[in-house]
Image (cartoon, rainbow, N blue to C red):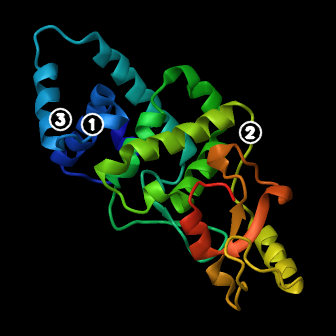
Amino acid sequence: RLAEALGGTVLPKDEKQELLLRYFALQCNGPKNFGKPSMKQHTLELMKRLNKEEADARFDEWRRGLDAALELALIVFPDPKERFRLAIDNGGADPRFRTSASVQKHIWDAVIYCLSRPDRKAALVARASDVQAAFVDLMLRHPAFETLTNKGTEARVAAFEDAIQNILAGHRGGAVSSNVRVEMIKDARRDEAPCPLCGEALGPSDDLLHIDHIVPLARGGRTEMSNLQVVHRICNQNKGAGVD
């Protein structure tokens, strides 16, 4: 299942072990304490627990969670070139994904941890496109994804978890289509509308503009015209998951 989820990417054995150890360390210590005081210390403590004669019953639960998360990740991100990658701005309506690394371990941490509850797997499978859209939107806009370090794990997990809860509660979200983007920018220029986040003119370049969710998907916002506005890309990035 891990090999399938990695999209056929050939990783050295120690890198595969690192991904698995990171998952179990996150389960053992929780997002708040993940990476504290160090990943080396996490690994040492985890290996001691794994090597105990009496197995920890929670490991069986975490293994089931890992299996569910890997299966769900295949469905939410069917393209292996996008799975466990960081979505980045493409200067347009559709994002692209970083492909310099086969797996971005900090994205792996947050995605796998948040998808590792078997009790809600079926519900998320049924809403896979909404989950993907919400996760991508957060990667593009939430400040926790601007710099990827262990320190930001708690914030990334919280953002993904909020998005999942909103989806399960019935809030629908998603990326704005290219046609809607073009029409919204056209209308904003016709009305000489300023950027609502900074009050300055939008400027001549469409590539420097974003369609912003006024109430972000992570906070229950929807992809509908009343919740969308044309803003400067830099203003939207600075806004993150806040509400203006």
Disc 2: CA contacts within 10 A as few (<14), some (14-19) or many (>=20): some
How many other residues sit within 10 Å of disc 1, few (<14), some (14-19) or many (≥20)?
some
Question: Which numbered circle lies on residue 20?
Answer: 1
Under mark 2, the amino acid is: His
How far is disc 3 from disc 2 in space, using C-alphas?
37 Å
Quote the CA–CA distance across marks 3 and 1: 13 Å
Q: Which residue is mark 3?
A: 42
Q: Is residue 193 left or right of residue 239?
A: right
Query: Can you identify the residue that label 2 sits on?
Result: 171
**Residue at point 82% right, 73% down?**
184
Cα gap from disc 1 to disc 2, whole angstroms: 32 Å
> Which residue is most to the bottom?
204
In what quadrant of the picture does the N terminus appear? top left
Judged left or right of residue 141, residue 31 is left
Label 2 SS? loop
Of the residues shown, which amino acid type is indicated by label 1? Answer: Leu
Mark with earlier residue (3, 2): 3
Q: Are marks 3 and 1 in contact (CB under 8 Å)?
A: no
